[in-house]
Image (cartoon, rainbow, N blue to C red):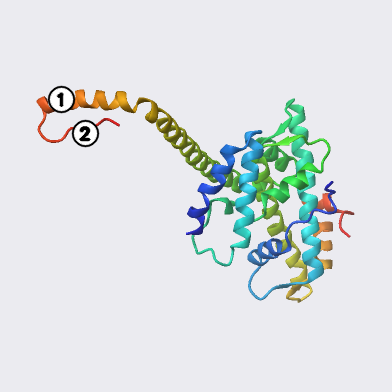
Amino acid sequence: MAERPEDLNLPNAVITRIIKEALPDGVNVSKEARRAISQAASVFVLYATSCANNFAMKAKRKTLNAGDVLAAMEEMEFERFLEPLRDALEVYKKDQRGRKEVSEQKRRDKERKADSENDKSREEEEEEEEEEEEEEDEDEEEEGPAVGTR
Amino acid sequence: MAATVEAPVPAEQDSARCGTEEENRGAEVEEKSQQQQQQTSSTGPAVPHSRLSKLPLARIKALMKTDPDVSLASQESVFIIAKATELFVEMIAKDALVYAQQGKRKTLQRKDLDNAIEAIDEFAFLEGTLD
């Protein structure tokens, strides 16, 4: 399924919402105007991408990064976008870090759980013996039931 | 809320897949943003994580990839372009409105766009590109 630029449009509902939120109440937008803005937005993406890619290629990188895009904005004379974009990027990065930590923590928990379940069956007998020994020791020091470290 | 419930699912899928981290996370963001779009009506006032951008990152990325010179794009770069496009739409709508108001109209029309494109330097790249 080869995607050509002409086939890829941005969702109309989203474009319409962005337009409506930018304009004062009571202002309408004709269908043709909306379509033209949507097309313009796609062209913008392509132009910005091409521009950003030039910066990446200049730096001998194969991966486009955020810095390339910001440099492209300046080149395209959209300096007014730079500050809001930088702010948005900060929020985005923080959000991504949070989500990455959540998924890594889950992965670690899963692995820990899997490990402990594997070990448990093999070493169960040995552990019980150890725990009994520990319990005996602990009883001498403390009163009350001994709690296994597991 | 819907946002917190969704979080575990993409993470598990993420760890199960092989491949570049970027692509995985890109897909993860895609799924979430697609889900968000469908759930827009039921989502409460709280802003879910991946709603930092109104435009779907998957679509933006697909558009970017139509450029033959582009091999890889970081997830951040896709996000920034999405955000910039949002700002662009706001800007062009407002600039076109000036012309509608000059014509004493409350409805933005195609010709207002054309006027704005012709008059404003930053929109010069659009000349000849719209149907």
The numbered disc on residue A136 is 1
Lower sequence index among marks 1 and 2: 1
Circle 2 residue? A147
Q: Residue at image x 58%, y 54%?
A: B51
Q: Looking at this view, is B24 or A130 the one in front?
A: A130
Q: Residues within 10 Å of mark 1 (few under 14, many from 20)?
A: few
Q: Residue at x 69, y 48 (%)?
A: B58
Q: How many marks overall?
A: 2
Q: Are marks 1 and 2 in contact (CB under 8 Å)?
A: no
Chain letter behind tag 2: A
Residue A57 figure quarter = top right
User: Residue A43, how many percent across, how many down?
Assistant: 80, 51
What's the amino acid at mark 1? Answer: Glu
Could you tell me the amino acid type at mark 2? Val
Distance, label 1 to label 2, CA atoms, is: 11 Å
A115 over B83 or under it: above or below: above
Badge 2: residue crowd in 10 Å (few <14, some 14–19, many ≥20): few
Residue A52: percent from the left, percent from the top?
74, 38
- Whether residue B76 is visible to the viewer of this picture, yes or no, is no
Q: Nearer the viewer, residue B102 or B14?
A: B14
The secondary structure type at the circle numbered 1 is helix
Q: Is residue A10 left or right of residue A147?
A: right
Q: Which numbered disc, 1 or 2, marks the residue closer to the eye?
A: 1
Does residue B73 appear in this view? yes
